[in-house]
Image (cartoon, helix red, strand yellow):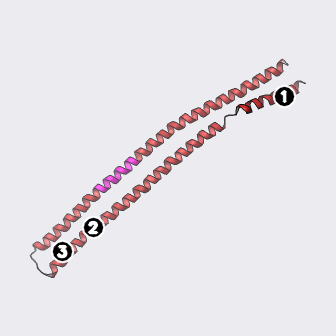
Amino acid sequence: MCVLAASIAVSLASGLAMRSAAIENANNTYDSAVKSNESAEQSFANQQEATAAQLKETRASAAQEKLAKTIQGLQARGRIRASEQAGLTVGLLSADAERQAANAREAISQSLESATNQYRRNILGLEADRDNRRNQLQSQVNNAYNQIPSLASVILNTATQGLNTYAAIT
C-alpha cells in the first residue's frame, strides 16, 4: 500500500511540475510577444513617418517645379511681347508658351498624384506586414497556452497511474 501511495504522489508531483513548467513557458512566450509587438509597432511608426516625410518632400519639390514652369511660361510670353512683333504670330506664340507651361505643370501634378497613390499603397503594405507579425505573435502565444495541461488532466493521469500501479501490485 505504501508503494501505491508513493507512486500516486510521484505521479501527481510530476504532473503538477509539468503543468507549472508549461505555464511558465506560456507566460514567457506572452512576455516575449508583447515586447516583439511593441517593437513591430515602433518599426511601423518609423517606416510610416519616413514614407510620409518622403511624400512631403516630393510635394514640396513638385510645388517648386510648378512655380518654376509658371515663371518660365511668363518669361517666354514676356520675351514674345518684348520682341515688338504684332499681329497673329505674337498671339500664337504667346498661346503656345502658355500651353507648354500648362502641360509641364499638369505632368508635375500627375507625377505628384502618382506619388500620393504610391504612398497609400506603401502604408497599406506596412499595415499588412504589421498585422501579419501581430497574428504570428498571437498564434505563438495561443500555442504556448494550449500546451498547458489542465488540472483535470493532471488528476486523471495521476488516477490512471495509480490504478495501473494498483493493478500491477495485486
**First-in-chain label (2 vs 1):** 2
Mark 2 highlights which residue? 104
Residue at image position (14%, 70%) is: 78
The N terminus sits in image quarter: top right
The secondary element bearing badge 2 is classed as: helix
* Residue 54 painted magenta: yes
Q: Residue furthest bottom?
A: 88
Identify the disc placed on residue 94.
3
Magenta: main secondary structure equals: helix
Residue 57 picture location, percent across and down:
31, 53
- Amino acid type of the residue that numbered disc 1 sits on in the rendered structure: Leu
Q: Is residue 19 above or below residue 135?
A: above
The secondary element bearing badge 3 is classed as: helix
Whether residues under marks 3 and 1 lie with C-beta atoms below 8 angstroms apart, the answer is: no
Residue at image position (73%, 32%) is: 152
Label 2 – label 1 distance at C-alpha: 90 Å
- Amino acid type of the residue that numbered disc 2 sits on in the rendered structure: Ala
The secondary element bearing badge 1 is classed as: helix
2 vs 1, front mark: 1
Mark 1 highlights which residue? 163
Residue 98 picture location, percent across and down:
22, 71
Q: Is residue 124 left or right of residue 158?
A: left
What is the span of residues highlighted in magenta in the rendered image?
48-60
**First-in-chain label (3 vs 1):** 3
Name which quarter of the figure residue 8 lies in: top right
Residue 80 picture location, percent across and down:
14, 73
